[in-house]
């Protein structure tokens, strides 16, 4: 027997995944760590290629670009990192919308405008006085404010998740097309039994 790094285990649910996996097949999380196992050199771990054709199983999650659904809940990811996770047992309603996906649009608009004004003041001070001491930091805040405003005024497809106490918004990536999102919502209702409203 020899030791090998043949599997990865999910830090969230503890499920073992293939070595090349980037997302857990059990819960959809992206936090996988190598699991040291022992295996006979003559008996490699079963792979999809050497399984009988009739035994291929469907993945234990559905994914639409950056949104993952499973029996454990709904996950929004960004560049492979989990942004938010809503457990299945807390979800009472799921609705698909197209519009502002900001979680608190009024608050983000106010802070975005304030940061943009600070950035414009830094730019004006830099051009008028030529002082570099803090003007670049102020301009950086202005860039942050403009990105907040852009996020508020840009329309996205998003899922509005209602729980017993509050609601969440899970934003789809801009690469996700309308047909792909519609198909994903149908799978949410049929396979995972979420109550999806249009």
Image (cartoon, grey):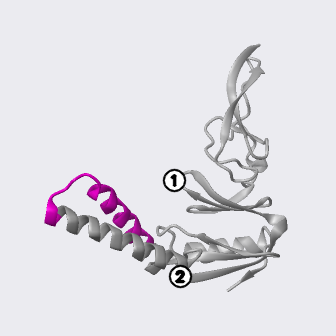
Identified at 59% across, 74% down, the residue is 103
Counting from the top left corner in percent of width and height, residue 97 is at 60, 82
Foreground pick, 82 / 116: 116
Counting from the top left corner in percent of width and height, residue 8 is at 69, 35
Which residue is under mark 2? Answer: 106
Which callout, 1 or 2, points at the residue further toward the start of the chain?
Answer: 1
Q: Which mark is residue 79?
A: 1
Q: What distance separates the C-alpha of mark 1 from that of mark 2?
A: 27 Å
Can residue 100 be seen by looking at this rendering?
no
Name the outermost residue toward the bottom: 198
In magenta segment, residue 109: no
| SS assignment at label 2 | helix
Instruction: Give the residues in magenta.
Output: 127-148
Identified at 21% across, 65% down, the residue is 125
Q: In the picture, residue 127 is in which quadrant? A: bottom left
Identified at 55% across, 69% down, the residue is 172
Q: Residues within 10 Å of mark 2 (few under 14, many from 20)?
A: few
Q: Badges 1 and 2: C-beta atoms under 8 Å apart?
A: no
Q: Which quadrant, please, contains the N terminus? A: top right
Name the outermost residue toward the top: 1
Q: Residues within 10 Å of mark 1 (few under 14, many from 20)?
A: few
Foreground pick, 39 / 147: 147
Foreground pick, 187 / 91: 91
């Amino acid at each position: 027997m020899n030791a090998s790094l043949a599997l990865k285990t999910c830090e969230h649910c503890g499920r073992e995944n293939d070595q090349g996996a980037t997302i857990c097949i059990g819960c959809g999380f992206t936090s996988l760590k190598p699991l040291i196992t022992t295996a006979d050199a003559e008996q490699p771990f079963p792979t999809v290629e050497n399984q009988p054709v009739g035994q291929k199983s469907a993945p234990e999650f559905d994914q639409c670009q950056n949104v993952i659904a499973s029996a454990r809940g709904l996950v929004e990811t960004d560049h492979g990192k989990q942004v938010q996770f809503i457990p299945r047992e807390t979800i009472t309603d799921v609705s698909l919308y197209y519009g502002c996906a900001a979680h608190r649009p009024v608050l983000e608009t106010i802070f975005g405008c304030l940061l943009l004004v600070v950035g414009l003041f830094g730019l004006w001070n830099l051009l008028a006085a030529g002082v570099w001491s803090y003007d670049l930091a102020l301009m950086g805040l202005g860039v942050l404010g403009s990105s907040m405003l852009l996020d508020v005024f840009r329309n996205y497809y998003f899922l509005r998740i209602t729980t017993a106490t509050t609601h969440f918004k899970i934003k789809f990536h801009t690469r996700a097309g309308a047909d792909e999102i519609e198909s994903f919502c149908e799978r949410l209702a049929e396979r995972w039994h979420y109550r999806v409203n249009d």
